[in-house]
Image (cartoon, coloured by chain):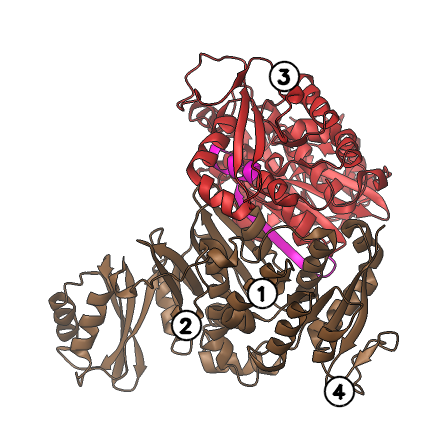
Chain colours: A brown, B red
Amino acid sequence: MTAPLRIALAGLGTVGTGVIRLIEANGAMIAQRAGRPIIVSAISARDRSRDRGIDLAAYPWYDQPEQLAALDDIDCVVEMIGGSDGTALELARKSLASGKSFVTANKAMIAHHGMELAKAAETGNLSLRYEAAVAGGIPVIKGLRDGASANRIERVYGILNGTCNYVLTEMEKHGRAFDDVLKDAQEIGYAEADPSFDIDGVDAAHKLAILAALSFGKALDFEGVEIDGIRHIMAADIGQAKALGYRIRLLGMARIDDGKLFQRVNPYLVPENHPLAHIDGSTNAVVAEGNFSGRLMFQGAGAGEGPTASAVVADLIDIARGDAGTVFATPASKMEPCERAESGNRIGKSYIRFIVADKPGVLAEITAAMRDAEVSIESLIQTEKAAEGSVLISMVTHDSRERDVSLGLAALSSSTSLKAAPVVMHLLSDQD
Amino acid sequence: MTAPLRIALAGLGTVGTGVIRLIEANGAMIAQRAGRPIIVSAISARDRSRDRGIDLAAYPWYDQPEQLAALDDIDCVVEMIGGSDGTALELARKSLASGKSFVTANKAMIAHHGMELAKAAETGNLSLRYEAAVAGGIPVIKGLRDGASANRIERVYGILNGTCNYVLTEMEKHGRAFDDVLKDAQEIGYAEADPSFDIDGVDAAHKLAILAALSFGKALDFEGVEIDGIRHIMAADIGQAKALGYRIRLLGMARIDDGKLFQRVNPYLVPENHPLAHIDGSTNAVVAEGNFSGRLMFQGAGAGEGPTASAVVADLIDIARGDAGTVFATPASKMEPCERAESGNRIGKSYIRFIVADKPGVLAEITAAMRDAEVSIESLIQTEKAAEGSVLISMVTHDSRERDVSLGLAALSSSTSLKAAPVVMHLLSDQD
């Protein structure tokens, strides 16, 4: 055995204490697999007096996380603080500047500052690892960086937010309304008190931007992700989708489209024969389609103390072994910004749901608007009374340009027949 | 860019030519990701004149594979010849002995000689990689060795043979007989002319033994795998299983049971809510359950030119980057032989199917035998006429010791009521 890998841990919430618990539980095995022990040489968190359910007396304590970056006898700083900027970012910059490798579970920070940090790491010949930042315990960063490394990745997409998937599949199983399910999810701790980061797709977008950079070797571009969440989905949408052979899932989807980068987080109608249609509850799953491997899928727990700690410590084992390879597979200095694809140009089938006044002529008005926009309709169902005096109409278009669908809907925007803004979701296809 | 990784390729069948095709197609990207180019510096195959649909004129040709091991200007030999012994093994031994790293897709050779070769590689500080040997294009070796490295793996199991899964899911979809589907599969090239290696579970057993060694850090023990295939499965079994909420899949299953190694390839009844129940066609999938990560699943194409080449070249990229870590995660010198678990001790539910004479008293005879063996029956269906004068009875036991089930069946073995040997399949549970 050679010298141990000495780590300093900043942030002792659920994940931070999970990392300590894991190293204590599996330490001997880890030392064997890593070729040397991994030891926690310093820890830091805001509140020293808080009971974290674990004895921390043996670990040297620092009140300020930034102190960890300045320590002499540390090889790697592990950041579990969170937040895209502030303390976490300062710690990352200072750790790398002082010659320490850096491991983080912080998707927001990597999504916003990944390029800067990757360049700093590669310039200093240091490791920057972030397996836990995407899809929790699923080793999908390694899966793409190492496992699928021989492939040009054609698309990368998946279920990247467990809260959304839990809410959608509960709505699906029990026919319940979004608000009801969300409230329950908050009570049992599956959703935050302020759930907007998850529910509105921002969390999934952070992860998607990271996956896209890794897959395509283009500069990370979080600002370029089109984002829509799941607030507007009704149990009736899920029912209609099911009748058509689809399940609704919030997907992050990225691909290179004629040399341009397409990135979108959106609820999609996923065909029942696609593996993502069977991902239920808070499970995450990532699909990567390589030009030689074909479709690969990685699934598992997307969050939680154990799974996240598993991902963090796997990064540490890589570093202890003598990490080889760059941060995003492609050297950061070679990752050029990529022009953004316009989603309006994309061609595919869409699901559109209207809530309209229950009066004669409404169907004619809607179908005429779609015809005028050159959107042809594959199927149309008018079934449910949405509320007193209004009905719900859902349709699926034939393959259409998304811009044309938007034009058709724009033409209807001033119509007094519509009781709510129409909801559009795309059908996942092999071309998406 | 530093000096290229120079490889020598032995065997130019589908996979060998696929590797060349991949390196030609994705070479620039690979050089960037690997930090240096990977170049094919020598090739060898039996028949130089055969048209392989690819121009090989630029590659130095050697008639004898063993010549590759002796070349001076080669860093890594890639073996695509196949066979557990003979030329492939000679080449592996000689390559490692002469200081060359070694990459192979040869599951039989690794299953039989993996320990010897791993020790040779580690003694010489060389890489031995075999991602393509298990589950084709799915990066499950890396997923276990690197992705799940922080975990004690509690079980590893999965669908490891695409031919069997194709046959079973075709039987399931169309209610067709085994022989019919196999014949079709042979005609379209999904099954070999001599399909016994696949159909009888040997191929899956090779892969399982490799996964077990990697997961548990115990010496590879292919001889210790209990093997049963899918020949005896009838469409009626699949129908009965479906009525009970299960799908039949050939699984390889390995776990450590009270310190003993349990390894088995068997058709299992998989509950519909388990992700493996949704793996159809020739797709492979591997589940690893870690003590922190929870259940991880990796799925994709288990065979084929592109997927296999993808796995081989990913290994080469790892080596070009400066491979870190040992062959089976645990150093080979530390992998002790492990006592084998007795499957008779295992407790679980079993599905048992009888073909019996259509006469009074048979049910009483069967149920009495099971009662005497202390096996209690959860459900029993007698539905189908198997042939003139005989009927099919299938039952599911409550949790029972497998030995007791065998005893019950042994007591019936001399019965003139049974028209065929009973078929037993286990129900996959969380305890399996």
Residue stretch rendered in magenta on the structure: B290-313
Q: Are marks 4 and 2 on the same chain?
A: yes
Nearer mark to the viewer, of 1 and 2: 1
Q: Quadrant of residue B368?
A: top right
Q: Nearer the viewer, mark 1 or mark 3?
A: 1
Q: Amino acid at mark 3?
A: Gln
| Residue A248 belongs to magenta span | no
Could you give the CA–CA distance between mark 3 and mark 4, rounded to whole angstroms?
66 Å
Question: In the structure shown, which secondary structural element does the residue marked by tag 3 occupy?
Answer: helix
Mark-to-mark CA distance, 3 and 2: 55 Å
Pinpoint the chain carrying mark 1. Answer: A
Cα separation between marks 1 and 3: 45 Å
Disc sitting over residue A47 in the figure: 4
Rounded to the nearest angstrom, the CA distance separating label 4 from label 2 is 34 Å
- The amino acid marked with disc number 4 is Asp
Q: Quadrant of the N terminus of chain B?
A: top right
